[in-house]
Image (cartoon, helix red, strand yellow):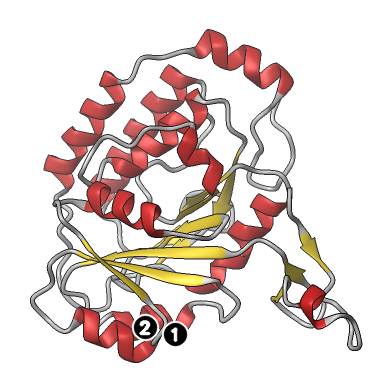
């Protein structure tokens, strides 16, 4: 598995050096990183989103959900090499699936287009992956995380749904309904994404556990949407998430066997027995 390495020194073979993407003067990575951004009418927010993205990422894949504003033109003006993919279906789940298929990187990062995510955190996600995790899951409630954009009712609902998932599937999540995640491409071969709405993040979180993949939570801070109104509807989408949870068959016995040989990772990178 690729890892974080020291960048090649001056004088080395340029073809050898081209394989590395410098993060700082002391660190570099070998795997190419793709960032998927589903967007619909987010032209005003994209300048803030793109500004925070690290310059060492391999590509940005913007999935346009039939925007009626200048979302696509703004994206191309900000980053001429952006890969724009038109969404044929509807919903965030469908948009993410479309974006994943268009990615060419070994690592895929999911970032919302509303300005609530700090692209500067991507290095923490990538570091977790190259250090041994299969799936790096953002958490607003892990130590060091936070949120400016959740009402008490939404926090309570998220806690309740997270508790159900932990008990039913043997997970140890501190957050459930959060869309800032990253993973190795091979994870897509082991989980099926067959939902179209906001519940897609919950489905991914459940199925990576059921597949026995190594998960590490990454403390993340969620900021307020900068412009516009979210399409999220707490009650409606909460029930959709609950339906997904109840519809997934628990395999805790198999999970325990897998954990014995391949344990989950905690938020600081240690193994959870």
Whole-number angstrom distance, CA of label 1 to CA of label 2: 5 Å
Q: Is residue 250 left or right of residue 21?
A: left
Residues at discs 1 and 2 in contact (Cβ within 8 Å): yes
For image coordinates 25% across by 35% down, the residue present is 241
Decide which of 109, 119 is in the foreground and name it. 109
Residue 165 position, x and y percent, is: 40, 26
Q: Is residue 262 above or below residue 267?
A: above
For image coordinates 57% across by 52% down, the residue present is 218
Residue 178 position, x and y percent, is: 38, 50
The residue beneath circle 1 is 51
Q: Is residue 30 left or right of residue 12?
A: left
Check disc 1 and report its element: helix, strand or loop. helix
Q: Dividing the picture into quarters, in which one does residue 10 lie? A: bottom right
Q: Kindly give the residue lying farthest to the bottom in the view shown.
A: 77
For image coordinates 43% across by 30% down, the residue present is 207
Q: Is residue 230 left or right of residue 183?
A: left
Mark 1 crowdedness (10 Å alpha carbons): few <14, some 14-19, many ≥20: some
Q: Is residue 92 above or below residue 228?
A: above
């Amino acid at each position: 598995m690729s890892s974080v390495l020291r960048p090649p020194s001056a004088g080395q073979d340029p073809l050898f050096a081209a394989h590395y993407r410098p993060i700082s003067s002391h660190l570099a990575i070998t795997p190419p990183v793709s960032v998927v951004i589903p967007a619909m009418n987010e032209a005003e927010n994209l300048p803030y989103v793109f500004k925070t993205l690290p310059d060492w990422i391999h590509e940005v894949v913007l999935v346009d959900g039939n925007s009626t504003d200048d979302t696509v033109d703004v994206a191309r003006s900000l980053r001429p090499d952006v890969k724009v993919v038109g969404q044929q279906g509807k919903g965030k789940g469908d948009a993410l699936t479309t974006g994943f298929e268009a990615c060419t990187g070994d690592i895929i990062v999911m970032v919302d287009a509303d300005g609530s995510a700090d692209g500067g955190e991507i290095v923490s996600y990538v570091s977790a992956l190259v250090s041994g995790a299969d799936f790096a899951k953002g958490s607003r409630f892990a130590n060091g995380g936070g949120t400016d954009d959740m009402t008490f009712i939404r926090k309570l609902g998220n806690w309740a749904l997270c508790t159900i998932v932990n008990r039913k599937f043997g997970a140890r999540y501190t957050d459930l309904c959060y869309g800032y995640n990253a993973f190795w491409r091979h994870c897509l071969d082991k989980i099926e994404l067959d939902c179209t709405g906001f519940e897609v993040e919950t489905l991914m979180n459940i199925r990576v556990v059921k597949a026995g993949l190594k998960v590490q939570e990454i403390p993340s801070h969620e900021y307020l949407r900068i412009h516009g109104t979210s399409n999220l509807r707490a009650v409606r989408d909460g029930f959709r998430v609950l339906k997904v949870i109840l519809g997934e068959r628990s395999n805790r016995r198999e999970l325990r066997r897998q954990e014995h040989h391949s344990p989950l990772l905690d938020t600081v990178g240690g193994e959870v027995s």
